[in-house]
Amino acid sequence: MSAKAISEQTGKEFLYKYICTSAAVQNRFRYASVTAETDWDRLSQEHPWLLTERLVVKPDQLIKRRGKLGLVGINLDLQGVREWLKDRLMRETTVGKAKGVLKNFLIEPFVPHPQDEEFYVCIYATREGDHVLFHHEGGVEVGDVDAKAQRLMVAVDEKLSEDQVTEQLLTHVPDEKREVLANFIVGLFNFYEDLYFTYLEINPIVVTNDGVYVLDMAAKIDATADYICKAKWGDVEFPPPFGREAYPEEAYIADLDAKSGASLKLTLLNPNGRIWTMVAGGGASVVYSDTICDLGGVDELANYGEYSGAPSEQQTYDYAKTILSLMTREKHPQGKVLIIGGSIANFTNVAATFKVTIFVRRGGPNYQEGLRVMGEVGKTTGIPIHVFGTETHMTAIVGMALGHRPIPNQPPMDAHTANFLLNASSSAVTPATTRTASFSESRKSNDVTPAKKSKAGLPAEAQASSGCSGAKATTLFRKQTKTIVWGMQTRAVQGMLDFDYVCSRDEPSVAAMVYPFTGDHKQKFYWGHKEILVPVYKNMADAMKKHTEVDVLISFASLRSAFDSTMEAMQYPQIHTIAIIAEGIPEAQTRKIIKVADEKGVTIIGPATVGGIKPGCFKIGNTGGMLDNILASKLYRPGSVAYVSRSGGMSNELNNIISRTTDGVCEGVAIGGDRYPGSTFMDHVLRYQDTPGVKMIIVLGEIGGTEEYKICQGIKEGRITKPVVCWCIGTCATMFTSEVQFGHAGACANQESETAVAKNQALRDAGAYVPKSFDELGVVIKTVYDELVANGTIIPADEVPPPTVPMDYSWARELGLIRKPASFMTSICDERGQELIYAGMPITEVFKEEMGLGGVLGLLWFQRRLPRYACQFIEMCLMVTADHGPAVSGAHNTIVCARAGKDLISSLTSGLLTIGDRFGGALDAAAKQFSKAFDSGMLPMEFVNKMKKDGKLIMGIGHRVKSINNPDMRVQILKDFVKQHFPSTQLLDYALDVEKITTSKKPNLILNVDGFIGVAFVDLLRTCGGFTRDEADEFVEIGALNGIFVLGRSMGFIGHYLDQKRLKQGLYRHPWDDISYVLPEHMSM
């Protein structure tokens, strides 16, 4: 949702901070918020004016007409305010159809004034610009301001002047107040624009000799502009509509949504309800809610929500878990129903004590496998799960769930995706004339197809396909259409090329890609069986210059960069159509795009859209789904039916319905769910009216806006003569007690005429074919189509099978058609989910258990959760091996490299490469030698004698500096810890006995730190209880113990590197006097 209501306190805080006007705005920041938890003594200390001034108190919960409802306390002292609140604070009240508890109140200074000092001002956004309404009589009795207020429209990208305000709005204002009001209104308008407001009403605004007082204020801001206004907005809290509580689960899903590129929405309507929904897609979620309410389930509907935009498996799991958690908290005597309009890989277990029935209907990529998995889950858990695919009408499961229609025992399943690899004859028919016309369209040099002549007397705005000054094309896409794709969307591009191939296009539709974040290069794709290269450019100018045949741009730019890239694209005259996929572009930016597009004659599809499709010719990005759906819905060749919808997901549903009830789609466009789509329903309906191949038109409108009324006007005036089947979704909104913002930003009615019910009735009255509900949409479409076939308007033709397209390896594997051994195997870490997992333990648990570095090393190296003392020992080993001065070979190498100007990694590697049996790498060797001797029953003296006889050094024995008389304190520290905490130290005791023998011969032949760690670690592995004897020996054999020294000493090497850089040491050269030059005698001087 873009336009979101803010509290009066938030709105006034913004205004007092950021309005720029010479008018004296009084009572700045003089407001106090009161809740049931308010400490009145502290409140009066923070706002001392509460004790000295007369006050006004009112609820701040998005309640309209508070004065008429008796919810404003006026001219009270602080004690009077408290008495007034006793009867209202935390009390339930009814406002319209909504019942809610009054929880938040606002206290402000009372401003005494006569009635003639009250005025009304309102600014609100529309597609064409921002309207400023002003009335010289404000206050509670202002009445119908739409009918009697002075009105001024400021076009997009234009500024408001004081002269305009004075001349057009302040005609009934006393002369002495005009200058102040004009200056304030201009400042207010600039403030409204700068902070991305979409609605701002002040009633009344009081103007006295002292200045301007803002008494009551209501406002909405464009929440999608958060990334622009964050510095000024801060963290804005958007309160729920009055009558609906704010639930933590809603906040949790909102947080998931904010962190994801997908769309995740949840609104709890009745937590005790028995009917729950989990629906994919903003449009589909509204349709399911409509159907539930149409069938009498409005009082039992528990939630509204949707998930779309390809959420990850983890995100879908978290969303499903939240729904199931809410659903199973309370029992219901009739049991509960979960209606799923999307595929879910796994379900959270539901307690057997709850009576739950689940109904699933889903289509899309690999939906057959998803439905099969759900069915299996039902069998294993004992939960009744009824699954249906695209062969079942989308909302049929609602009737089944509510008992209004029978549940089929074995519904017919469509062919598996893999079956589409083979050509197959079909009895389906398509109109010969339509197909021939579409495939044989000639490309005109100006790319503009003249529209039919309008009937005499029609208004000018009805005669053009849009209200722009630049002429827009009637035909947007042909079989020769070429496009540039902005963004590295390789999957979408491959889908477009596969579509081109099955449509028997001569060449791919994608001429090039633009991606600013990489250099110019070529990207590999498939064209049927062969590989091709598509050029990728760093900037749009190069792409346009080298591909002059391109006339369409498909923009996958992010919401932050979509505006700039679109404005740049419109500077190239060759572009006549732009599809903007991104959702969440601020409305002010969208309106600027629309204005420039209208001036230049460019058709904009989107924002917030999947795009559009013209079967047999061209498709935008991911429109129509993957190849299996393209083939199933016969989108590879044109039919006779054109449609336009807001929803991308519902456009694919229309593809399915139309393919099952008619000869197929001729063209389809999803204009997008934002309040101000780049092109409107009427733009496309008029194009279809002027396209010979289109025989009937389908419009899927929705709640919010008034665009559908233009279709009514076009039908009544005769501009639209082809049959129009129309249905507006969102009929359930009038049945809810509180306002619900549906999935699309534009799906919210601000007045009665914008409701879906009102628009459906108007369309029906105008002569459009309007079903009773979405359930009957397919039936009405088939009825109209059959009439056109009967009267000869459509002549069916034999179906021609499309060429086969090889399936991608990755998709074939996803479908389970092939298998391939993995190149790697891993058993210690899994990063694929939402949370990193170490050896089966989520990273949050690692921190919750305070496992430390030793515990993490235990998980990643040994796949075990080691005892606490073992983790501490590992950490001690890392500490004592971290460094041993700059003179040792590893540190020396690191220092030399650092002084040679090498980077950190190179210097560290140089030091690590010196580690071996002679330096630091004796841990493994010591562990192996001592273990072998001990395990064979060899006495310490026998072990020493044997090593001497074999001419081998005993690894871990000996030190260049330390001795029995000058012990290594590192070894002493470790020895004390091991003796205190280890269950057994047999090998360590054995090594200490060996040390007694070796030091008797030479005092520096001590058990050094490498040897001590090696033998102690063997004791740890063998006696901690986490390993078998074979497992313990295997870890020694594969070199795990040397890893301790490598890891520990890396810390020291990095320290030496940083130290040399910090000291700015120059290139090292070894001094001559420290080198003994030994040359052959005949070469000596």
Image (cartoon, rainbow, N blue to C red):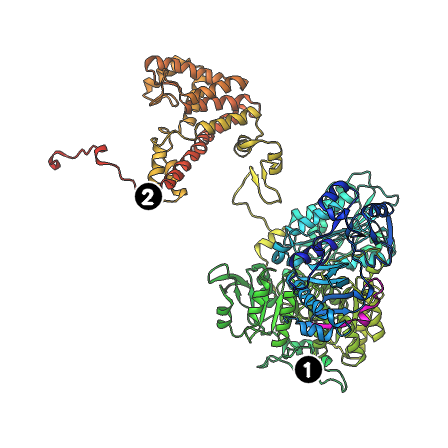
Determine crowd level at label 1: few under 14, some 14-19, many 20+ residues with C-alpha closer than 10 A. Answer: some
The tag earlier along the polypeptide, 2 or 1, is 1
Mark seen at residue 128? none
Q: For the point 58% across and 35% down, which residue is it?
A: 839
Query: Of the residues shown, which amino acid type is indicated by label 1?
Result: Ala
Residue with the mark numbered 1:
451
Quadrant in which residue 952 is drawn: top left
Q: Position of residue 872 (x, y in %)?
A: 53, 26
Q: Is residue 990 left or right of residue 734?
A: left
Q: Position of residue 154 (x, y in %)?
A: 68, 72
SS at circle 1: loop
Q: For the point 62% across and 51% down, which residue is it?
A: 814
Q: Position of residue 697 (x, y in %)?
A: 75, 73
Residue with the mark numbered 2:
900
Which region of the structure is painted magenta?
139-153
Q: Please, is residue 773 above or below residue 969 in the view?
A: below
